[in-house]
Amino acid sequence: KLVMMQKSSTNPKGRRSRDKWITQRKFSVLSLLIMALFVVRTALLPKIGRKDVRSTRTEEQGNQLGRVYLARTSDSHGWCVQSKDEKSASGLLFIKLEKAASSTGAGIALNVAHNVAIRGNVEHCVAHVEHYKTQQLPLSTRSHQNSLLWTIIRHPAKRSLSHYFFFRVSQLHEKPNNEAMLLHLETQKNFQFHSLQQGSFTNHTVNDIVQEMDFIAIAERMEESLVVFRLLFGMKASDVIVLSSKKSGGYDGGFFNETCHKIVPSFLTRETKQYISTAFKENNSDYELYAVANAALDRTIDSLGRQRVEKEVLYHRHLQRVAEKACQKEAIFSCSRDGVRQIRLS
């Protein structure tokens, strides 16, 4: 056909025939592409639909249960007590959850307690910053006026993966592999939910936890969380500025086996990514807890005034940069930049 068209290209009929043939070929190719796209779309739609429905359902639960954290308008530092009460939890109570910015939270809690004590002209303010579970504290009889109960939670998948790489890979020097990674992630389901439950695992819901806590910060929204935290409880901007001692590629705290261990960065394999997006979410209340806490943070920001909070976040970032520039090189952590243990100097 091409030969015939070339021979007849000099006359109008030949040109029309050639153009018609080219148009038909383009139409055929376009039809095949449309059919192929339809087949691919049909194959992918069920998976995308299931994922979207599950994600939407969790967000809806969060929006329904999310509360507004209450500000301490009078006696905002009533939690600053000078002695521990064994029968009733009192003081600044920070619940540390492993691999959920717990070291940062503990540093903030100690900084807040120290600064409030100085401003209040008292010797010290009691602060609990250990890896407590709420079951280990006498919360059933705690005085809300004489205590401030808070914690930091992290996205369930990110926290669980970080937990595996920190404890198993970095500290125990295990070589990462799919089987071990998947087994470890399975053990981390509901970790944050169970750690924050008070008493029986079956009698307390996510809503119970969020209602009992005075504040829940979100690791992925740390700047917003810390600004809201200090605005609610009458703290100074400098109270919530701390330096991070643990960074990916750096060293841990040097307490495990009295040795500094280099922190191996986390990574996802194809199998792990698939597991996290499917089976890991099943019967895992950490996702509901994360959604509800995010909704509560958003509602509290709205109640304080979103523009006000955004302005304070910018100021917080400025102070953080100033502190890091002035102190990061001078600060002495429990493990040096070269991995030398220096607990006494820190």
Image: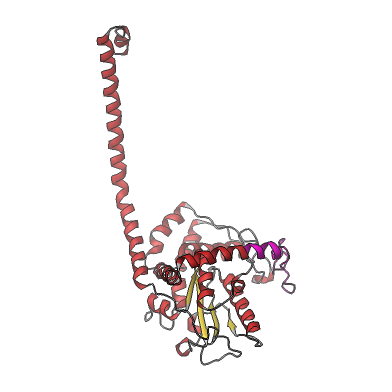
Point out the residue furthest to the right here. 345
Residue 343 is a magenta residue: yes
- Can you say whether 207 is above or below 265 in the image? below
Q: Is residue 209 visible?
A: yes
Give 37 or 331, whichever is nearer the viewer: 331
- Image-quadrant location for residue 57: bottom left
Q: Quadrant of residue 283?
A: bottom left
Give the side of residue 208 with respect to residue 154, left or right.
left
* Apparent side of residue 122 relative to residue 140 in the rendered image (left or right): right
Residue 133, above or below 54: below
Please report the bounds of the magenta region as a residue range: 320-346
Task: Return the x and y of residue 87 as percentages of the image width and height.
Answer: 52, 93
Colour logic: secondary structure
Q: In terms of secondary structure, what is the magenta stretch mainly?
A: loop
On-image quarter of the N terminus: top left
Q: Position of residue 79 (x, y in %)?
A: 54, 85
Foreground pick, 264 / 232 = 232
Magenta span includes 304:
no
- Which residue is at a point 64% across and 71% down the rendered structure image? 256
* Residue at 32% from the left image edge and 13% from the top image edge: 2
Q: Quadrant of the C terminus?
A: bottom right
Residue 71 % position (x, y): 47, 79
- Left/right of residue 41 with respect to residue 152 in the rendered view: left
Marker count (numbered): 0
The residue that appears at 49% across and 62% down in the rendered structure is: 158
Pick the front one: 92 or 133: 92
> What percent of the width, then of the height, locates residue 28?
27, 28
Residue 219 seen in the current view = no
